[in-house]
Amino acid sequence: MADETFSEPPGIGPVAIPITDVFDLHSVPAKDVKEVVEEYLAEAHRLGYKALRIIHGRGIGVQREMVRAILARTAFVEHYGDAPAEAGGWGATLVTLRVNLR
């Protein structure tokens, strides 16, 4: 039997996600959440966003805790907490970023 070389199918790889003030993690694979949230926060801050909403879902709280651990160690995050009920409650986190002083 000959050796077969496998490669990624065309179209698989990094996907550009538009940066807005709301980021829904439901479409992000669990293994990528940490890296994707860190990149999202950096880009949102670079673009000058002051208020964000990260939707992580309710579940058992694993993604919520992962998101909040990232927020706690991100220098330009001023404040974060549960969204009000009409914006997702404890299934979403509201984030306030410090103004990007250049």
Image (cartoon, helix red, strand yellow):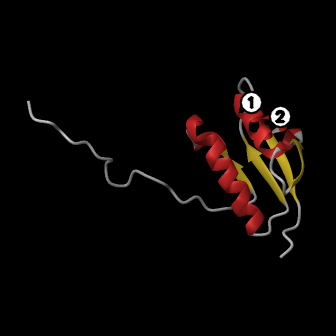
Provide residue 96's location: percent of width, then percent of height: 88, 55
Q: Are marks 2 and 1 in contact (CB under 8 Å)?
A: yes
Q: Residues within 10 Å of mark 1 (few under 14, many from 20)?
A: some
Left or right of 88 on screen, residue 39: left
- Identity of the residue drawn at 79% across and 50% down: 53
Q: Which residue is mark 1?
A: 58
Q: Nearer the viewer, residue 68 or 24?
A: 68
- Name the mark on residue 90: 2
Tell me which corner region of the image, top left, top right, bottom left or bottom right, holds residue 18. bottom right
Question: Which corner quadrant holds the C terminus?
Answer: bottom right
Provide residue 47's location: percent of width, then percent of height: 74, 69
The outermost residue toward the bottom is 102
Q: Is residue 74 above or below residue 1?
A: below
Q: Is residue 2 above or below residue 19?
A: above
Q: How many marks?
A: 2
- Identity of the residue drawn at 73% across and 54% down: 22
- Identity of the residue drawn at 32% across and 54% down: 10
- Say which amino acid is labelled 1: Arg
Q: Residues within 10 Å of mark 2 (few under 14, many from 20)?
A: some
Tell me which corner region of the image, top left, top right, bottom left or bottom right, holds residue 70. top right
Counting residues from the start of the chain, the first of labels 2 and 1 encountered is 1
Q: Secondary structure at mark 1?
A: loop
Provide residue 99's location: percent of width, then percent of height: 88, 67
- Say which amino acid is labelled 2: Trp
Q: CA distance from mark 2 to mark 1?
A: 6 Å
Left or right of 17 on screen, residue 57: right
The outermost residue toward the left is 1
